[in-house]
Image (spheres, rainbow, N blue to C red):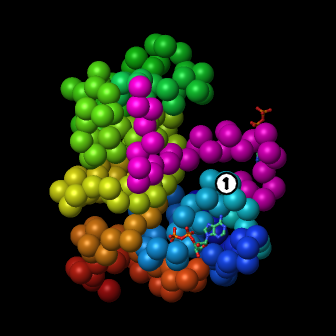
């Protein structure tokens, strides 16, 4: 579970990026964080990754209080979260296979485990046939699927996706969202930052909306086919 308790974040220059934010995300949920540019979405993600510290409040992820976490534990903590970005962030000089395998090598997985797990993950994201390709030989949607495979290879409990479809056309964006939905159905908690009303409407999931650093709504089921 992710518990964000009364979090505020004021940057050194005085910008109040987040104000009194309370959010609870249960294991297995699929949640959108919505809001215009500058509303505080990235700040929230950075706090969850412990790349920034809140000015006040507490964040508890899977019973770990991020404020009390020993510094040496931070890399290990981050590896329990899968992260995907708008700009994919793949290693350009490595193949698809190597991009995904790399994340496993970092945690000391055996060659045998890597040979088993990488193909399994590439199959899940629908890229089995592209394992030898380099990132520049792939479409944007395919590159994002590699990034998702890499984010999931160490079986994180939570997948954080920061504008994962920001660089994709509608069709590819829809494919990525379907993939995230499937991953969620397999048990991973999924948190997606987006500013796309269209995607949120299409998916009909929980939507938390930020505006100028404040949480302005938290709808259990967003989108056009709301039942409540
Ligand atoms: P979003 O991701 O929704 O676009 P951000 O979290 O990036 O929003 O930004 C929220 C606010 O905090 C904005 O006003 C932004 O300019 C400001 N901000 C973001 N990062 C920094 C920083 N490192 N230093 C100062 N202000 C920042
Ligand atoms: P080592 O580096 O010796 O293997 P770990 O990195 O596994 O130790 O971390 C030491 C212990 O501290 C672990 O049991 C971990 O769960 C716990 N721990 C780390 N940070 C927190 C936190 N913020 N809240 C609660 N427990 C924590």
Q: Residue at x 28, y 46 (%)?
A: 140
Which residue is depicted at the point 29% across and 21% down?
132
* 63 or 98, nearer to the observer: 98
Coordinates of residue 156 in the picture (x, y in percent): 52, 43
Quadrant for the C terminus in the image: bottom left
Q: Specify few, some or many for label 1: CA neighbours under 10 Å numbering under 14, 14-19, or 20 or more.
A: few
Nearest the eye: 21 or 9: 9
Residue extending farthest top: 112
Which quarter of the picture shows residue 206? Answer: bottom left
Range drawn in magenta: 64-93
Q: Nearer the viewer, residue 163 or 58?
A: 163
Q: Residue at x 53, y 16 (%)?
A: 110
Question: Does residue 18 appear to the left or right of 156 in the view shown?
Answer: right
Decide: is 170 above or below 13. Answer: above
In the image, residue 197 lies in the stretch drawn in magenta? no
User: Could you tell me residue 104's position as x and y percent?
Assistant: 52, 27
Quadrant of the image where one finds ligand 1: bottom right
The residue carrying mark 1 is 51
User: Is any part of residue 93 visible from this angle?
Assistant: yes
């Amino acid at each position: 579970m992710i518990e964000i308790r009364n979090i505020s974040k004021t940057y050194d220059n005085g910008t109040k990026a987040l104000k009194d934010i309370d959010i609870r995300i249960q294991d297995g949920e699929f949640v959108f964080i919505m809001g215009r540019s500058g509303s505080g979405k990235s700040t929230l993600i950075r706090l969850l990754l412990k790349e920034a510290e809140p000015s006040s409040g507490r964040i508890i992820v899977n019973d770990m209080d991020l404020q009390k976490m020993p510094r040496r534990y931070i890399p290990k903590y981050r590896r329990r979260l899968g992260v995907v970005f708008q700009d994919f962030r793949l290693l350009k000089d490595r193949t698809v296979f190597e991009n995904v395998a790399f994340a496993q090598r970092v945690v000391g997985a055996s060659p045998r485990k890597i040979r088993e797990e990488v193909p399994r993950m590439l199959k899940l994201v629908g890229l089995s046939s592209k394992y030898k390709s380099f990132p520049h030989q792939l479409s944007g949607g395919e590159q994002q699927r590699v990034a998702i495979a890499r984010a999931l290879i160490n079986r994180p409990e939570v997948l954080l996706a920061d504008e994962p479809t920001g660089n994709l056309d509608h069709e590819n964006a829809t494919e990525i969202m379907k993939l995230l939905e499937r991953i969620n159905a397999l048990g991973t908690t999924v948190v997606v930052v987006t500013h796309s009303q269209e995607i949120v409407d299409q998916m009909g999931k929980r939507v938390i909306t930020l505006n100028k650093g404040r949480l302005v709504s938290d709808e259990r089921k967003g989108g056009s086919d709301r039942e409540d």
